[in-house]
Image: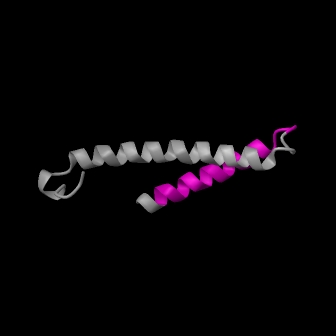
Amino acid sequence: AIFLAISYIGLVAAAASEIVTRIPGLEASFGAAVGLTSALVIGVGMVLLARTLGRSMRRMPAHWQKGVD
């Protein structure tokens, strides 16, 4: 499930980068636009994924959480 979520975050980052590159006037800074958009989407996605996983871990029975910080 984690790998699937990460894959979808990557797809959203690619789609967002594609949309940003269609904005007129960004031809000169194509690489910067793609890099910044991808970094932003991936960063937000990872934060949301970490929050979701943290909530899931808190709901687990205590004996399943041994060795997990």
Q: Is residue 3 left or right of residue 38?
A: left
Question: Which quadrant holds residue 54?
Answer: top left
Indicate whether residue 56 is drawn in magenta.
no
Residue 17 horizontal/vertical position (percent)? 71, 48
Question: Main structural element of the magenta stretch: helix, strand or loop?
Answer: helix
Q: Residue 63's image quarter?
A: bottom left
Identified at 51% across, 46% down, the residue is 45
The foreground one among 46 and 28 is 28
Q: Residue at x 53, y 45 (%)?
A: 43
Residue under the point 29% across and 48% down: 56
Identify the magenta region: 4-25
Quadrant containing the N terminus in the rendered view: bottom left
How many discs appear? 0
> Residue 64 falls in which quadrant of the image?
bottom left
Please state the horizontal and vertical placement of residue 30, each as a whole percent of the image. Answer: 80, 48
Q: Colour scheme used in the picture?
A: one colour
**Residue 19 shows in this picture:** no
At 20% across and 51% down in the image, what residue appears? 60
Where's residue 3, x and y in %? 46, 62
In-front residue for pair 40/4 = 40
Residue 8 visible, this angle: yes
With respect to residue 20, does 4 lie above or below? below
The single residue placed furthest to the left in the displayed view is: 63
Would residue 22 be counted in the magenta stretch?
yes
